[in-house]
Amino acid sequence: MSLLQVENLSISFARYAGWLRREIIMPVRQLDLALQAGEITALVGASGSGKSLLAHAILGILPANASLGGSILYKGEKLTAARQAKLRGKDIMLVPQSVTYLDPLMRSGAQVCLAARGGDPRKLQRAAFRRYRLDNEVEQMYPHQLSGGMARRIMAASAFVSGACMIIADEPTPGMQAEDAAETMKWFRELADQGHAVLLITHDLEAAVAGADRIAVMNAGMTVEWLPASHFSDKGERLQHPYSRALWNSLPANGFYVPQSDWRAVSSREGPGCPFASCCELAAAICREEQPGMREGERGWVRCHAS
Ligand SMILES: Nc1ncnc2c1ncn2[C@@H]1O[C@H](COP(=O)(O)OP(=O)(O)OP(=O)(O)O)[C@@H](O)[C@H]1O
Ligand code: NI
């Protein structure tokens, strides 16, 4: 059984457009994903594709005007608001990108102690400090006294001592030097090796391919493909969705191929067919008539009629 199973998730927001006219926008519409213990799953996709919304939906921290459709199961049971409140920060941990998430009024040692589960908090904190190469003096420091690197280590140490089953990292590496990014990825690998399920949200497909076990590709609020990271190789022949291939081949290392179609132009998305029918070079008649569901193929899951 998967630790977390997301099925046909949609997230919509009601907002007022001018006087009394209420409109509904649905930035996430068909999201399917499962996370396994002991694995890193990377969720990749363009800015605005709905990645962070998924993280917020899992944690139960969406704004009040959001409505959810579909389901999220955690350990086989529906994730209700009450369960989310219980699990958040304990069983399900967020590793945020920014240090501003650390409590500015709490010393670093105390922050890590507070996260610790399953033993003497002080002992667990000291062990985590040694593991992440944090000197003893750092215990007494407040977040504003930490360098960026130290703050990241404090967040990694908190995740390490938390005993959380699931760790969600939203864009943990942008703006980092290559070595720092590699070190951060190494920490996630260690956490996965200890049995945690890690969800890594990132723009960086190259880092995802290098560091994750599985990759879910999102576009316009949908998961279009979900498969082992090793299938991202060569010219992308083993990828099934044309959008995943376009994303892969547009990387500098793969020749900077510029796709013929503009994958952000999903003009027909309210129509009956595939939302990408108007921009996909493989689109056939069926793509304009019927929404593709997520189906399991030889190499993973894909939402496409044409592949
Ligand atoms: N509270 C909200 N009300 C209305 N729309 C929202 C709200 N939050 C997010 N959205 C919209 O949902 C879409 C997806 O947002 P999300 O933050 O999940 O994207 P993302 O994939 O994480 O992007 P990025 O890579 O830039 O972080 C965006 O178009 C955004 O404008
Ligand atoms: Ni985001």
Image (tube, rainbow, N blue to C red):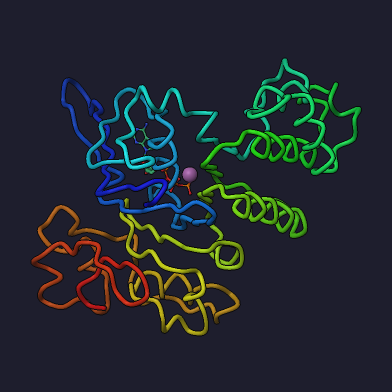
Query: Residue 91 at x, y = what percent?
Result: 51, 33
Q: Nearer the viewer, residue 39 or 285?
A: 39
Q: Residue at x 15, y 52 (%)?
A: 270
Q: Which residue is most to the front?
A: 119
Q: Nearer the viewer, residue 90 or 274?
A: 90
Left or right: 140 with respect to 124? right
Relative height, residue 155 to residue 252 (above, below): above
Image quadrant assignment for residue 145: top right
Expressed as whole percent of the image width and height from the top left, the position of residue 296 reads: 28, 69
Q: Quadrant of residue 95?
A: top right
Tell me where residue 39 appears, x and y as whole percent: 53, 56
Identify the image quadrant of the C terminus. Answer: bottom left
Number of marks in the rendered image:
0
Taking the image as shown, residue 292 lies to the left or right of residue 205, namely left
Where is residue 155? Give x, y as percent.
68, 36
Residue 106 vs 94, above or below: the answer is above
Q: Is residue 117 above or below residue 128?
A: above
Residue ID at (73%, 24%): 120
Residue found 33% across the figure and 42% down from its top: 76
Q: Residue most toward the top?
A: 105
